[in-house]
Image (cartoon, rainbow, N blue to C red):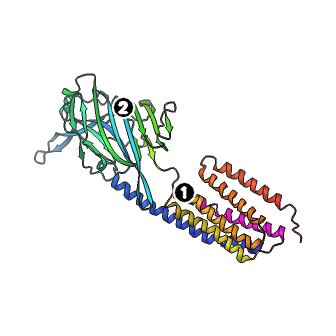
Amino acid sequence: MIMVAFLTLILLIPLAFVNELIRERSTRQQEVISEINDKWGESVYFYGPILKVPYTVFEETLSINQKTNETFKQQKAITKYAYFFPEDLKAKSNVITKVLNRNNYESVVYSSKMNFNGQYIQPDFSSKNISPDVIQWNKATILIKTTNLKSIKDEVKINLGGTKFTFEPVYSTNLNDSTQALETGFIDLKNILKADKTNFNFDITYNGSKQIKMVPIGKITQLKMQSNWTSPSFTGNFLPDDKTKKISDNGFEANWKILHINRAFPQQFFENLPDLGTYAFGVDFIIPVDQYQQNERASKYGFLVIGLTFLIFFLIQSISKIKIHIFQYSMIGLALILFYTLLISITEHSSFTKAYFIAAIAVITLISLYSVSILKQRKFPMFIAAALTGLYTFIYVIIQLENYALLVGSIGLFGILAAVMYFSRKIDWNK
């Protein structure tokens, strides 16, 4: 018993090497994914469109004439900016995902066509007591902040009040700002915003990966997103409407409606435009449990598999009085370790389920045939084959489960303990 227990602990060393191999391959996969995503397009963050209106403020300074010692006032004109968000903002996004492969690794990427439309109202400067005379109405622009300029596939133009304006990239001198900007040329608001509400609309097409997020800057913000991705992870500060959300084998459809009273920022800012990324919402396009995560979860049960398999052989040895040499235990343990190297190597060229099935059959067959020569009978090897089949099936079910893995695992271990207690009840441990 001492030697078998010691051997079990010794086998944790090659099992640790297997875990390290899985982590190494997983790290390599992340590097390849980052490289693929960098070339195709990173995650999309959208913050706009924002009406940017310049205005002039005058600062007075006191100066002294050195010859006469007289004090006089000087006025300096400084241009500042006010930022106004849309009254209504409606967005539609059609996201088509696909898996890109490089060697044995894969990454989920997407192409997204987004349509935005809404309304602006007349900018109101009264809250800051700014005179209409100092507002530079003819030098207003529209601003969009994003994180993925290089993956925009078409020219971006906005139709505001029946007139089209083209967005151009803006160089940012703020190194701490991770976003990039698109901005139109000058817009004469006196000619454009003639009505109480002025409509706008524009399209933008992205290549991206991992995620789409946007900031709800409209007084009423609505987003409708459709995709062929079957495992969406809704993220951010707001979740879609459960009543209209649909997820099926063909993809998903989700709808958001966010009011200005649902977020803690106003409809206009003066002087500085803050980063409101903490209020963004959207969808993550990721593989929920990839092949390396599944392999890592399987290897965590390695100690359990080795321990229970040795326990089965030890009980058979105790009941049948057949002697099993420690070398034979070692061969069985190495076969169990080999299961995980087979699993990860086959998974990289196939699916995890198929790899698990092939590796399990190979190891169960190897140990069963080896036990025929050890135990000299057919009933014990058949029992071992059935026990290992049940054990590997039990572990596979746990790996596939997410929310109920702990519950099923606990119940299964309780059943295994009960079975061991039942079969060992007649063994006389005093002999």
Look at the image and give the residue range highlighted in magenta.
Answer: 298-322
Count of numbered tags: 2
In the picture, the disc for residue 90 is 2
Residue 267 screen position, x and y as percent: 35, 32
Q: Residue at x 66, y 55 (%)?
A: 393
Q: Nearer the viewer, residue 94 or 181?
A: 94
Q: Nearer the viewer, residue 394 or 281?
A: 394
Q: For this view, does 71 lie left or right of residue 319? A: left
Residue 151 screen position, x and y as percent: 31, 49
Q: Name the residue that disc number 1 marks.
A: 352
Q: For this view, does 46 lie left or right of residue 163? A: right
- Upstream in sequence: badge 2 or badge 1: 2
Q: What is the C-alpha distance between the residues marked 2 and 1? A: 41 Å
- Which is closer to the viewer, label 2 or label 1? 1
Q: Is residue 233 above or below residue 193?
A: below
- Would you say residue 10 is visible in this rendering? yes
Q: For this view, does 63 lie left or right of residue 220? A: left
Residue 22 screen position, x and y as percent: 53, 64
Amino acid at dot 1: Phe
Q: Residue at x 54, y 67 (%)?
A: 20
Q: Quadrant of residue 17?
A: bottom right
Amino acid at dot 2: Lys
Determine the secondary structure under disc 2.
strand
